[in-house]
Amino acid sequence: MTSAATGITTPGGILDGIVLFEAFTPEERAAVASRGRVFDAPAGTVLMREGDIANSLYVLLDGTVRVVRNDPFGGQVEVGFRRAGDCFGEMALIDGGARSASVIAATPVTVFELERELFLALISPSPDLLAKLLRELSRMIREVSERVVREDLERRARIAESALARQRAITQAVTGLAHELNTPLGVCVTTASHLQDLARPGNGPLSSEELREPAALLDANLARAVELVEAFSAIAACQNSEPLEALELRRMAEDAAALFAVQHPDLPLVIRVAPGPACPWIGCAPHLERVLHHLFANAAAHGYGGGPGDVEVTIQPAMLDAVPAWSLTVRDRGAGIPASNLPTLTDAFFTTARGRGHKGLGLAVVFNTVTGPLGGRLAFDSMPGAGTTVTITVPQEL
């Protein structure tokens, strides 16, 4: 079929399966298709610009686009993604008003474009076609409104649930911090008192030998107290808001694995990210990087005890409370975790390796970050001798 607008051949069934034209007959869809054109565009192409006069409807036939809006400070805010089969700019067919958002190709795309004037010329002589279009637009608007309300309620419930879980975790962390600090501060107080006794008049001059041991005790225990406070501060850092970005999750996991290897060249840990299709994600890079860093470190220290080992990262599409999500798993083949320890893994200061200097805050940071700013879920699957799998499920769009 040759487009009346461009002379380009357009497949007659190109609009089959598109929700907006679902009520149209095959012949009617073919007639609409004949008035439009199909074109390809590389990633980064601006297909629609916020504020421009709306004069076309677009149907995304292949690829992914980003929907963004301008904020009051001159920046851009990610609104969402559109994928193959989705329409955008459909309100242009009715009002021809200004665009409410910009649409940018996130990947190479194939798009069907239908100009408003050509479409109106087609349907104006046919009240039946116009009625079908209005019914479909009304239904789409109603469904969008209902979905927005439902998602808002679900989001509020998730926020309340996560806030309660974080509050419990922070309460446990504060209690644990007080307990952990008690020992080094007690040693420091005792040592300082001993030094005061040694320095009292009548005890004579102090030798360097007499000062060496209490000075070492003070230094070591004050350093331990500082480390505990810094580690505890990491939990508070989990709640800091970060700007949302349009990211590619698989590439981000690869970058996090490479960065971990550079930062820990002494650890014989091999991290592999399973190949697969692109995973577009609107989220916070620093938060997820922190989570992956702690999980890699945990696998190295506890799964393999500092010895050689490997970790595999996989990413698959999933659903989270009826919202499209990504399921990211971090799997090792190390020592595994006893079932009795699984319920307390994310408690602050829980560790089975305190004798090796571990504080037990890494997984508390992971839990608070995943359930807090990332708005997701965290799950563990492990058996002694069979390794550990940590599954992070986060919404595709925060």
Image: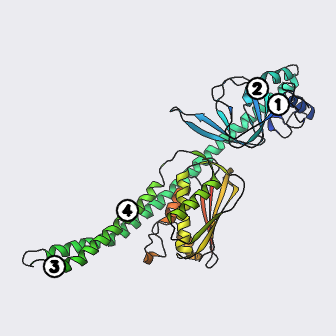
Q: Is residue 296 above or below residue 77?
A: below
Residue at position x 43%, y 73% in the image? 357
Q: Which residue is mark 1?
A: 37
Quadrant housing residue 195: bottom left
Quadrant housing residue 42: top right
Q: Secondary structure at mark 2?
A: helix
Q: Earlier in the sequence, mark 4 or mark 1?
A: 1
Measured as percent of width and height from the top left, residue 350 is found at 47, 70
Question: Is residue 373 among what the camera can see?
Answer: no
Q: Which residue is mark 4?
A: 229
Q: Earlier in the sequence, mark 3 or mark 2?
A: 2
Neighbours of disc 4 within 10 Å: few (<14), some (14-19), many (20+): some
Q: CA distance from mark 3 to mark 1?
A: 92 Å
Q: Earlier in the sequence, mark 2 or mark 4?
A: 2
Q: Which residue is mark 3?
A: 207
In the image, taking residue 167 as reference, residue 13 lies left or right, namely right
Q: Nearer the viewer, mark 4 or mark 3?
A: 3
Q: Earlier in the sequence, mark 3 or mark 1?
A: 1
Q: Secondary structure at mark 1?
A: strand
Q: Which residue is mark 2?
A: 93
Measured as percent of width and height from the top left, residue 18 is found at 82, 38
**Three-letter code, disc 4:** Val
Q: Is residue 92 above or below residue 109?
A: above
**Three-letter code, disc 2:** Leu
Q: CA distance from mark 3 to mark 2?
A: 92 Å
Residue at position x 72%, y 57% in the image? 276
Question: Does the residue at mark 3 contact the one at mark 1 (Cβ under 8 Å)?
Answer: no
Q: CA distance from mark 2 to mark 4?
A: 60 Å
Residue at position x 78%, y 24% in the image? 116
